[in-house]
Image (spheres, rainbow, N blue to C red):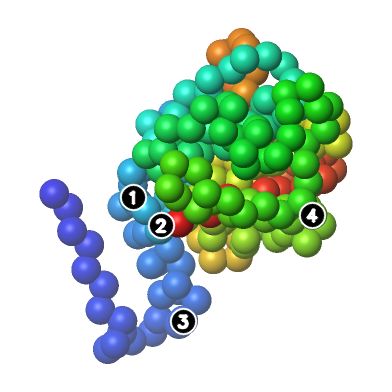
Amino acid sequence: MEIDLVCVENSEGLKGKQIQKTMGEMRKKHAFQLGEELADKKGSLFYVKDENLYYAAIESKKIPAFSILSNCEVINYASCLKAILKASGIEASYDEIIKQYLNTTIDEKFIPTKDNSNTIAGRKMVTAFVPQTKLQATDIVNELLKERFMIAIDKDGNVGLLTAIALTGEQDYQPVHVRMRLPTMAKDEQRVQMPWRDFCNRMVVLVKVDIY
């Protein structure tokens, strides 16, 4: 094991910028490097050396597989809610989610877009709809660092679980791209990476989901 020690208190001839540069290089050198699977450490950003980017993300193995019935807006949205519930250890049926929680039917063509609060399997679930224009990258980072899923809904009514956001820095939170899981029939099409600008142009609302 190699250990680098830097004593800045009595340093001579070093300026603040030089010290910050040195510390930044050390942080990148010793940061946890990620591959396809993102790190299992709640509450921290992770540096991906090959991409020179920082990630706030929910680890892949903590994202339950979708139970997909058909390509319908209401069912796809319910699939996202079902996956989020399952991640919290709650098994809920489509009937419970669609009829009891969403107060709609599978024949309805549009996703209910009003904030909702109800109980499923003895647990309270609250969904809050936030227009994309009012949600900043910082909000997404904070949700993901707490391992809380968000559901993204685009202009065409397509939905997906927002699972990761890539940033150029550890503190300024300049977004580069996001990663999502889509409830599609084809498994090879479920993982999507989208540039931040495209994401902002396509998405109309993000849904925060809290389970108590």
2 or 3: tag closer to the N-terminus = 3
4 or 3: tag closer to the N-terminus = 3
Q: What x and y, as percent, mark residue 87? A: 42, 38
What's the residue type where badge 1 is placed? Answer: Lys
Residue 131's disc number:
4
Q: What x and y, as percent, mark residue 27? A: 37, 59
Q: CA distance from mark 3 to mark 1?
A: 30 Å
Q: Mark 4, mark 1: which one is toward the viewer?
A: 4
- Circle 3 sits in a helix, a strand or a loop, which is it? helix
- Circle 2 sits in a helix, a strand or a loop, which is it? loop
Q: Are marks 1 and 2 in contact (CB under 8 Å)?
A: yes
Q: CA distance from mark 4 to mark 3?
A: 41 Å
What's the residue type where badge 2 is placed? Answer: Ser
* Left or right: 54 as drawn, with respect to 117: left
Q: Quadrant of residue 183?
A: top right
Q: Residues within 10 Å of mark 2 (few under 14, many from 20)?
A: some
2 or 4: tag closer to the N-terminus = 2
Q: CA distance from mark 1 to mark 2?
A: 6 Å
- Circle 1 sits in a helix, a strand or a loop, which is it? loop
Q: In the image, what residue occupies the spot 50% across and 39% down? A: 84
Residue at the top extreme? 186
Q: In the image, what residue occupies the spot 78% across and 46% down? A: 113
